[in-house]
Image (spheres, rainbow, N blue to C red):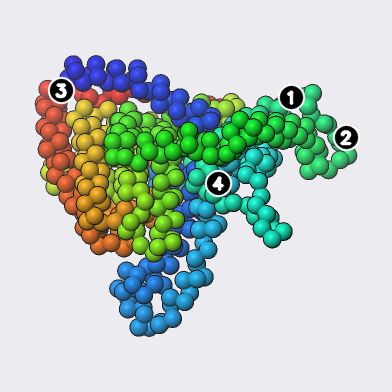
Amino acid sequence: MGFMASFERVMEKALVPVAAKLNSQRHIVAIRDAFILAFPITLAGSLIVLLNFAVLAPDGFIAKMLFLNKLFPNLADFQQVFAPVLNGSTSILSIFIVFLIARNIAIAMKADDLLCGLTALSTFFIVYPAYTVVDGANFLSTQWVGAQGLFVAMIIGLLVGEIFSRLSKSKRLQITMPASVPPAIARTFKVLFPIVIITVLFSVGNAIILAIYPNGIHELIYAMIQTPLKNLGTNIFSLIILAIVSNLLWVFGIHGPNTVAAIREGMFAEAGLENLNYVAAHGSAWGAPYPVTWAINDAFANYGGSGMTLGLIIAIFIASRRKEYRDIGKLSIAPGIFNINEPIIFGLPVVLNPILIFPFILVPAINILIGYIAITTKLIPPIAYAVPWTTPGPLIAFFGTGGNWMALVIGFVCLAVSTLVYLPFVLASNKAAAIQESTGTSNNDLPA
Amino acid sequence: MKKILLVCAAGMSTSLLVNKMNDAAKDMGIGIDIVALPISECSKAAEEVDVVLLGPQVRYQKAQVDAIVDGRVPVEVIEMRAYGTMNGSAILDRALELIDQNQ
């Protein structure tokens, strides 16, 4: 127990301040919240693409299950209707992100968030590659409004967010209208100078960058930042390490996924989106460009929530005779099916529990490896469809691969493995609690 | 009608707690209005409530919430065990206590 206590102290000193910073630093929070807000649109697009290929296509897994092609022979013709859906979500994700990041920064700094977001949007297109003229008509390239443009969107969102918020606070730059002027007009004039300054600033900056690097800022950022980060992310080691860090944070009562969200999006967002674009174009997840994405964690290592706590709950029901464990188990199973685990994490608790922290971190890592091996040995295709994270675990693997039954099986295998690994730790935990009771000590004094 | 804001990461686990707290309030025979929101969306609601409670897993974002609330009402992190066991009545009692202290 001495080792455990000093390990905890070291972690508290080292990890907790970092986590605190990551959870409250306004730029990181702005990025994280922007992706959270944009996700429903990506999700809707993904589900409709899934619908397109699972229900409307003659060989879709739902169509086959329900014999839809016998009942409605012309369903495939309607696929055209839904084909453009991703044009409104993943293909223009950078547009949503640049607006949302700037708006979030403005909210944090108590500036006009709507106008700040609009200014960032405007700036985004000011520095965008010039129109291509074909037969007298202007065309905008789609290359940098989607997944590939994410980092430029993040940088512009942050810069405009900061500059606008600071400038708009300066009294000298505010044009104050007389009280008789309608509020909407007064509001726009109030920030007119900051907007003009930002426009000029970024136009000049863009010109300078184009002079030094004629391929333009998007190519530059993509080559120097986004691609290395993406390569760093889409390999199995980064995935496991990030999952371990996220779960380690939970052990200290800190919301792990939230804390690592900004880093996680930076490393995995583009890969996930490219996979989604791939299935939209090809109708099948087989051959998707990025086998390793964060989706492996959600599909195989997150049942019940972080730490694969559904395995813990099942292990408790199998092995634990202790009333308080079974009570928490009963309380946690309903939210656990939908991957919400605060009840069991704080109720058992798993937080700062010296016995349970081992399986909590170990089990997801094992499950990620199982999923990874299944994908790289081509047993199942990569996870390409975005699915809500509250979907019951094995179904994420099932729908994420576009209806692959083997993926569902692998999901249940992971659940079984996790239960088996949790079992000895649950037994040990019960024994430890029994010993404490008989010797009259208590381990219930946890830091506030 | 006392108004309470619960804040967590995605609004999921706190919405479970809302039901428990509403049940507890009914048992106590008092009327309360509880809303559960993620941190990223709580700034509007924070202006209209009498107390703000944070889930323990987002206690490191208390500074962010304090800045939004600006001292107008009490902001407190819910005790871990009470949150984990979804102890609606204990948390409700604490919320009402904080509101009274602030009046």
> Which kind of residue does numbered mark 3 sit on?
Gly
In the picture, which quadrant includes the C terminus of chain A? top left
Labels 2 and 1 in the same subunit: yes
Image coordinates for residue A251, horizontal then vertical, percent: 30, 30
Disc 4: which residue: A144
Disc 1: which residue: A170
* Circle 1 chain: A
Q: Residue at x 16, y 46 (%)?
A: A417
Q: Residue at x 53, y 43 (%)?
A: A149
First in sequence, mark 2 or 1: give its number: 1
- A353 or A153, which lies in front? A153
The picture quadrant where one finds residue A21 is: top left
Mark closer to the observer (2, 1): 1
**How far is mark 4 from mark 1, CA to CA?**
34 Å
User: What kind of element bears circle 1?
Assistant: loop
User: What kind of element bears circle 2?
Assistant: loop
Mark closer to the observer (2, 4): 4
**How far is mark 2 from mark 1, CA to CA?**
18 Å
Mark closer to the observer (4, 1): 4
Labels 1 and 3 in the same subunit: yes
Marks 2 and 4 close (CB-CB < 8 Å)? no
Disc 3: which residue: A440
Marks 4 and 1 close (CB-CB < 8 Å)? no
First in sequence, mark 3 or 2: give its number: 2
> Which kind of residue does numbered mark 1 sit on?
Ser
* Circle 2 chain: A
Disc 2: which residue: A178
Labels 2 and 4 in the same subunit: yes
